[in-house]
Amino acid sequence: MLRTLSFAAATAVAATLMASSAGAEIVLRSSDTHPDGYPTVEAVKHMGQLLEERTDGRIKIDVYHSAQLGEEKDTIEQTRAGVIDLNRVSMGPFNGLVPETRVVSLPYIFRSTDHMRAVMDGEIGEEILAAFEPHGLVGLAYYDSGARSFYNSNKEIGSLEDLQGMKFRVMQSDIFVDMVNALGANATPMPYGEVYSAIETGIIDGAENNFPSYESAKHSEVAKFYSLDEHLIVPEVLVMAKSSWDRLSPEDQQLVRQAAKDSVARQREMWEARERESRSMVEAAGSKITTPDKQPFIDAMAPVYEKHVTDPKLQDLVQRIQAVR
Ligand code: GTR
């Protein structure tokens, strides 16, 4: 019973079962869109192992990978409602809900993964984690997601000109729609799980993502042309339902937060290895990777910044991010 209910929903049941159950008292249900073995899935499993060890098996995490609990947008709502306890998601789908997530979803805001890590590991990252709380969520940790680039089923993209008029799927956020439009292409927001068949049937020409997603979601089978423009370095985030969090004792909250933080280094290690592996896998399977000149892509993003960074608080965050060395 405990295994299928969220901690929030199971608490009432747990209260009666606890006395007789020799197993975990608290089982946290965690969602991820990626398949088993993907670095984010394995990182949350690792966090669960740490928690089990540190609580003598009293707190456990069950990871529901492969979008078993739904597409990201829906799982975010379910997490806010306390139906799902933990959720590992991209920052992108939070853009409509948590304004602070918008700054780290801007194209080319981070110069490199090292820059992203320096920002997210520091005080700006902590501020953004805290910004989830008024929205029914507790931000726990960030994971790496490399850089996202465009891929498509039609042709090589050697320059910005080649993108003109093409149709790309983006995550469900207005920033990404405007980003693609500013490049002269057309954006179609849609859930991740629909992208493969949308490319296959020609509803869209392609999408944009990092190598591990491109490979593991098998988009590489239907979109062979990958263009390394690296327009987005957008971190992943692990959030917890505020209602599940509030049911934990302060000591357990501390344990959960620490285990989440401690899983980050493991995720990054796995991420770096997986990026390399995925890239060689898709290349071996016939994907053609091109490297366009990025500068015209970067220059084309000015209107996106003008439109989306109007709030003084977000303007300040952008400046502080750019100032991080
Ligand atoms: C992946 C990310 C997922 C999801 C997906 C998407 O890189 O890890 O959380 O956001 O992209 O494009 O929907």
Image (spheres, rainbow, N blue to C red):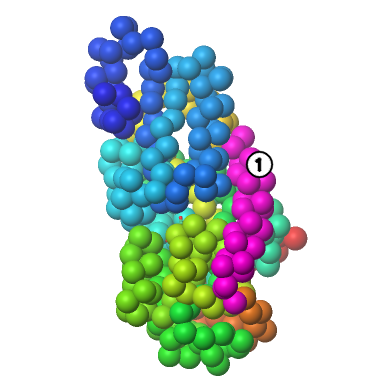
Dominant secondary structure (helix, strand or loop) of the stretch shown in magenta: helix
- Name which residue lies at 61% across and 87% down: 158
- Name which residue lies at 57% across and 88% down: 160
Left or right: 155 with respect to 322? left
* Total numbered labels placed on residues in the image: 1
**Residue 208, relative to residue 51: is it above or below?**
below
Location of residue 276 (image quadrant): bottom right
Q: In the rendered structure, does residue 168 fall within the stretch colored magenta?
A: no
Name the residue nearer the viewer: 315 or 174: 174
Quadrant in which the C terminus is drawn: bottom right
**Residue 159, relative to residue 256: is it above or below?**
below
Work out which residue is located at the far right of the displayed protein and give it. Answer: 325
Name the residue nearer the viewer: 180 or 169: 169
Residue 75 visible? The answer is: no
Residue 6, given in percent of the width and then of the height, sits at: 31, 32
- Name which residue lies at 52% across and 52% down: 236
Name the residue nearer the viewer: 36 or 132: 36
* Residue designated by label 1: 265
Left or right: 313 with respect to 290? left
Residue 24, given in percent of the width and then of the height, sits at: 40, 18
Q: In the rendered structure, does residue 273 fall within the stretch colored magenta?
A: yes
- Name which residue lies at 56% across and 19% down: 54
Q: Secondary structure at mark 1?
A: helix
**Residue 250, relative to residue 117: is it above or below?**
above
Ligand 1 within 8 A of label 1's CB? no
Residue 186, given in percent of the width and then of the height, sits at: 40, 83
Residue stretch rendered in magenta on the structure: 262-288
Q: Amino acid at mark 1?
A: Ala
For label 1, the crowd category at 10 Å Cα-Cα, with few meaning under 14, some 14 to 19 and many 20 or more, is few
Quadrant in which the N terminus is drawn: top left
Name the residue nearer the viewer: 26 or 137: 26
Residue 18, given in percent of the width and then of the height, sits at: 32, 12
